[in-house]
Amino acid sequence: MRLTRATIWIAGAILASTWACAQDQGELRLHLVSSLAGKPRAVPAVLWLEPQPGTAAVPLLPSGHYRLLQKNRTFIPHLQVIPVGAVVEFPNADPFFHNVFSLYEGKRFDLGLYEAGSSKSTTFAREGVSYIFCNIHPEMSAVVLSLSTRLYAIADEHNGFDLRGIPPGDYKLHLWIESVPQAFLRGLVRNVHVPARTTDLGGISAPIPRAGTAMHANMFGDAYDKEAPGTY
């Protein structure tokens, strides 16, 4: 294949433009540090940025459809971040009934009892954290975080965040950390300025609890039955 001077020039221009755009973007890093005694553990957590006045708005990701699978009495994945307005499917891949519900801030719903091989869905039309449970199996839990920004990062296995492709400007930084009280999380909200380079905010201390399943009530606010029917 023969390359003309025009082809080479265009390719070079594209590469230069791509490099220039990359140089104009900021990167934000930080990591979580447990304030509690004991060996630290990886914890589901999300960081996101809210543009402040004077900072260019970032387009929202397309809504689309997402899936939270129920299999082996487990929600897969345990944590899912979606754009506001997205539809989430809840297929039942277990050979017994499930009843998915949420009674918390982001989206309150009850999908009712449905059998193996069937699926139900719901739309998350507002921003917020939704804690998802099954009204039959208390060990099942998941989290759906609906956001009005694509500037977010999920913590890695070392409780670290690395958010790239940030337009330089001023933002409000938000954190959600599983099992950490909402009142404490509100205290972690802070204003940050992101320049066109890597910014490391260091460590943020939070009361990250040890591993274990947190107790919760069923959809009626009562304790779960100790013995569920065999067909469930």
Image (cartoon, grey):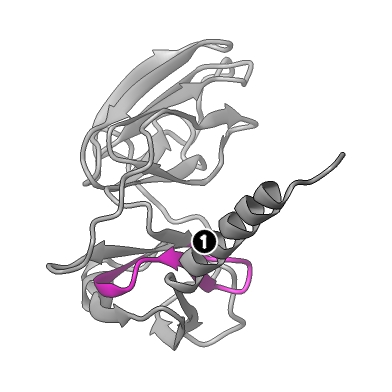
In-image side of 28 versus 94 (left or right): left
Q: Find residue 10 and report its horizontal and vertical position in percent.
A: 61, 51
In-image side of 97 versus 216 (left or right): right
Q: Nearer the viewer, residue 126 or 40?
A: 126
Residue 156 is covered by the magenta coloring: yes
The residue depicted at 64 percent of the width and 59 percent of the height is 12
The residue depicted at 71 percent of the width and 52 percent of the height is 5
The residue depicted at 40 percent of the width and 15 percent of the height is 113
Q: Find residue 24 and report its horizontal and vertical position in percent.
A: 42, 71
Question: How many numbered discs?
Answer: 1
Q: Secondary structure at mark 1?
A: helix
Q: Quadrant of residue 86?
A: top left
Q: What amino acid is at disc 1?
A: Ser
The residue depicted at 63 percent of the width and 16 percent of the height is 95
In-image side of 87 versus 160 (left or right): left
For the stretch drawn in magenta, the main secondary structure is: strand
Reading the image, the residue beneath label 1 is 17
What segment carries the magenta color? 154-175
Q: Nearer the viewer, residue 38 or 47?
A: 47
Residue 3 is covered by the magenta coloring: no
Classify mark 1: residues with Cα within 10 Å, few (<14), some (14-19) or many (20+): few
Residue 4 against residue 70 in the figure, above or below:
below
Residue 189 against residue 142 in the figure, above or below:
below
Residue 52 against residue 136 in the figure, above or below:
below
Q: Find residue 179 and report its horizontal and vertical position in percent.
A: 40, 63
Q: Can residue 125 be seen in the rendering of this structure? A: yes
